[in-house]
Image (cartoon, grey):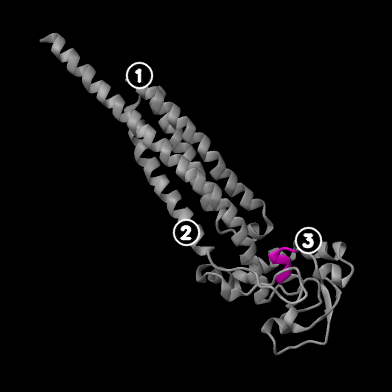
């Protein structure tokens, strides 16, 4: 039984290591400007990673110090966490399955439409109360100012691979017909009937297109790209945890079998 318990402890240690990429994915999301403004996915991921770490530590202690109650807690709690992780992986995939940039004439960068994204994501930015806070956070960043430093000529800007957030928030939509002065300053002629965002644009550097639906769509496009990267990490960890959990279950079952067999042999020795 000691050998099987040690195997269970070693498996639990591997599960502890697997919590690191989950926590790391959450921390990485907090470092991205858009995610730090929205604060939707990173904390559930970090909390789930910490729970996996704590439960795995309990299994590690229970395995090497031969505490059956901790091993049983580990097996039950880890099963719940694996199910939760799997649900999170599926959820992130489902809410990011729709939405992509649209090609516009004579532009290398893409433009984004809010209606292309999932209803759940749209509801996170459509509320004026929620968006006011997000907009204030985004406008305090340097993402638009960086464009002015990088692109002086119109054609250089039109050929640039800018981020979805910069495309949606730092310039007016192409269909509005604004004339380029610099990446964050544009003048008429303007087709105000093309899109409501055309009326929302302001050359005031603290306003720009932060009130536009294109800005909200650009934010969701950025979130989609980053969430998909995090989801790949979570999926790989999910599969690895399933394998580790199944091996741990087998080791625990073998330990119980060895214990029963040992007690049976001791009982026969006394008869």
**Residue 115: x %, y % from top left:** 57, 76
**The magenta stretch spans which residues?**
162-168
Q: Is 90 left, or right, of 232 in this rendering?
A: left
Measure the alpha-carbon separation of dots 2 and 3.
Answer: 31 Å
Among the two numbered marks 2 and 3 on one chain, the one whose residue lies closer to the N terminus: 2
Q: Residue furthest left?
A: 271
Q: Nearer the viewer, residue 262 or 94?
A: 94
Quarter of the image for residue 257 reads: top left
Find numbered disc 3 in the image and state the secondary structure of the residue it sits on.
Answer: loop
Instruction: Tell me the residue that label 1 is attached to.
Output: 2
Q: Residues within 10 Å of mark 2 (few under 14, many from 20)?
A: few
**Residue 157: x %, y % from top left:** 82, 68
- Determine the residue positioned at 69% across, 63% down: 137
Examine the residues drawn in magenta and state their main secondary structure.
helix
Among the two numbered marks 2 and 1 on one chain, the one whose residue lies closer to the N terminus: 1
Instruction: Tell me the residue that label 2 is attached to.
Output: 91
Find numbered disc 2 in the image and state the secondary structure of the residue it sits on.
Answer: helix
Find numbered disc 1 in the image and state the secondary structure of the residue it sits on.
Answer: helix
Q: Is 1 left, or right, of 234 in this rendering?
A: left
Q: Is 161 left, or right, of 224 in this rendering?
A: right
Instruction: Tell me the residue that label 3 is attached to.
Output: 142
């Amino acid at each position: 039984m000691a050998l099987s318990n040690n195997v269970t402890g070693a498996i639990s240690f591997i599960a502890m290591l697997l919590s690191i990429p989950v926590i790391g994915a959450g921390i990485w999301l907090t470092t991205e400007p858009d995610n730090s403004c929205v604060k939707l996915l990173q904390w559930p991921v970090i909390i789930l990673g910490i729970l996996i770490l704590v439960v795995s530590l309990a299994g590690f202690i229970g395995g090497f110090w031969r505490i059956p109650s901790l091993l049983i807690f580990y097996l039950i709690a880890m099963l719940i966490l694996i199910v939760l992780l799997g649900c999170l992986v599926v959820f992130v995939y489902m809410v990011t399955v729709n939405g992509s940039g649209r090609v516009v004439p004579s532009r290398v960068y893409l433009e984004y439409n809010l209606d292309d994204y999932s209803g759940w994501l749209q509801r996170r930015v459509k509320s004026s109360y929620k968006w006011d806070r997000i907009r204030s956070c985004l406008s305090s960043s340097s993402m638009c100012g960086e464009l002015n430093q990088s692109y002086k000529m119109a054609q250089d800007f039109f050929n640039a691979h800018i981020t979805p957030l910069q495309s949606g928030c730092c310039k007016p939509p192409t269909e509005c017909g604004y004339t380029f002065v610099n990446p964050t300053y544009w003048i008429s002629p303007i087709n105000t009937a093309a899109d409501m965002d055309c009326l929302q644009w302001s050359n005031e550097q603290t306003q720009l297109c932060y009130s536009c639906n294109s800005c909200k769509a650009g934010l969701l496009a950025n979130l989609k790209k980053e969430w998909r990267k995090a989801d790949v990490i979570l999926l790989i960890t999910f599969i690895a945890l399933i394998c580790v959990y199944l091996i741990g279950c087998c080791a625990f079952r073998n330990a119980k079998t060895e214990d029963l067999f040992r007690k049976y042999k001791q009982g026969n020795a006394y008869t």
